[in-house]
């Protein structure tokens, strides 16, 4: 019986570690996506500013 408890505990621990790693990956992907959206917005802002400068000055 004790051996079964140990196996069950190890299995639960493995699932917990797997879930933690999965969540970590999702967070990293989300951070990367946020950064790229930010960079794209900055780029578009610069382009808009350049166009404005060319057209209206």
Image (cartoon, helix red, strand yellow):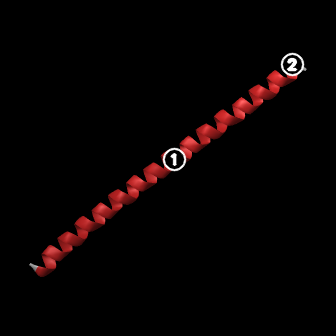
User: Within the image, what quadrant is residue 6 found in?
Assistant: top right
The quadrant of the picture occupied by the C terminus is bottom left
Residue 30 higher or lower than 54, as above or below: above
Mark 1 Cα-neighbour bin, 10 Å: few <14, some 14–19, many ≥20: few
Q: Residue at x 86, y 19 (%)?
A: 3
| Total marks placed | 2
Residue farthest toward the bottom in the current orientation of the protein: 56
Can you tell which mark lies on residue 2? 2
Residues at marks 2 and 1, CA–CA distance in whole angstroms: 37 Å
Q: Are marks 2 and 1 in contact (CB under 8 Å)?
A: no
Q: Residues within 10 Å of mark 2 (few under 14, many from 20)?
A: few
Label 1 sits on residue: 27
Does dot 1 land on a helix, a strand or a loop? helix
Please state the horizontal and vertical placement of residue 53, each as a whole percent of the image. 14, 74
Q: Residue at x 15, y 80 (%)?
A: 55
**Location of residue 30 in the rendering, given as x and y in whole percent from the top left corner:** 49, 52
Residue at the far right in the pictured view? 1
Judged left or right of residue 56, residue 10 is right
């Amino acid at each position: 019986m004790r051996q079964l408890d140990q196996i069950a505990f190890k299995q639960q621990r493995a699932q917990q570690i797997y879930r933690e790693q999965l969540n970590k990956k999702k967070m990293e992907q989300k951070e990367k996506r946020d950064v790229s959206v930010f960079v794209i917005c900055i780029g578009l802002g610069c382009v808009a500013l350049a166009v404005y400068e060319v057209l209206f000055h």
